[in-house]
Image (cartoon, helix red, strand yellow):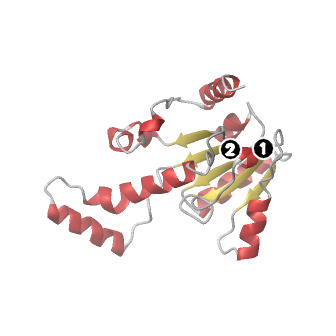
Amino acid sequence: FATVIAATVTSRHGNYIAYFPSYDCLEKTYKAFIKKYPHVETVVQKKYMSAHERDEFLAAFKDDEGYLRIGFCVLGGAFSEGVDLPGSRLIGSIIFGVGLPALSNEKNIIREHYDNKSDEGIGYDYAYTFPGMNNVLQAAGRVIRREEDKGIVVLIDDRYGLPTYQKLFPKHWNHLRYVGDAASLAEVVGRFWRERE
């Protein structure tokens, strides 16, 4: 995951947030990233943050174009929705996983309810797939806050190539590019920024 983050941020310095499916995944990737790239400024979401700590986290995302800063956050958490970082305060989101909520009795009741209403087996989608994709859309939506904003969203998971997920993409995502490795990602991201200079 650390290599994918590096491939995304190589072409343009700025503020990015990498979103992870769990704190465990976040912590492992963060440790690997700072070991490999110790000079990059990072800010990390903690499990239990006070309002003051959340404000400090967001304040780190300054409007200072050309300076590389990466936030490490949990998908579906406090910093993946309702956060407004316009302009150069956030130019990219890197989203690992499809945002599936944790298995729970409540979600399984929802799944059972929709499975009983239909023979199409849609319960899993209503209980897990749709809420997960909503988390992804919320995190992606942190990048473009105003009409003049420019930024990139990188989705990391093979499942995004499946029709189940592709049909959930917003229509304005019709310019998506699929890549298979970090080198290809760096090339596509570089081209994206060159075309917008």
Residue 1 seen in render? no
Task: Judge the density around disc 1: few (<14), some (14-19), many (≥20) Cα neighbours within 10 Å.
Answer: few
Asked if marks 2 and 1 touch (Cβ < 8 Å), the reply is yes
- Pick the residue in front: 18 or 57: 57
Q: Is residue 64 above or below residue 189?
A: below
Q: Give the x, y percent position of residue 148.
A: 66, 39
Q: Give the residue number, with chain letter if any, for mark 1.
A: 36
Determine whether, in the image, residue 13 is placed left or right of residue 21.
right
CA gap, disc 2 and disc 1: 8 Å
Determine whether, in the image, residue 90 is placed left or right of residue 67.
left
Determine whether, in the image, residue 104 is placed left or right of residue 182.
left
Give the quadrant of residue 100: bottom left
Instruction: Tell me the quarter of the image containing the N terminus.
Output: top right
Q: Tell me, for residue 2, which label it has, or none.
A: 2
- Pick the residue in front: 132 or 84: 84
Q: Secondary structure at mark 2?
A: helix
Q: Residue furthest right?
A: 39
Residue 116 seen in render? yes
Q: Give the x, y percent position of residue 59.
A: 79, 61
At 46% from the left and 37% from the top, the residue drawn is: 172
Identity, as a three-letter code, of the amino acid under mark 2:
Ala
Give the quadrant of residue 78: bottom right
Q: Secondary structure at mark 1?
A: helix
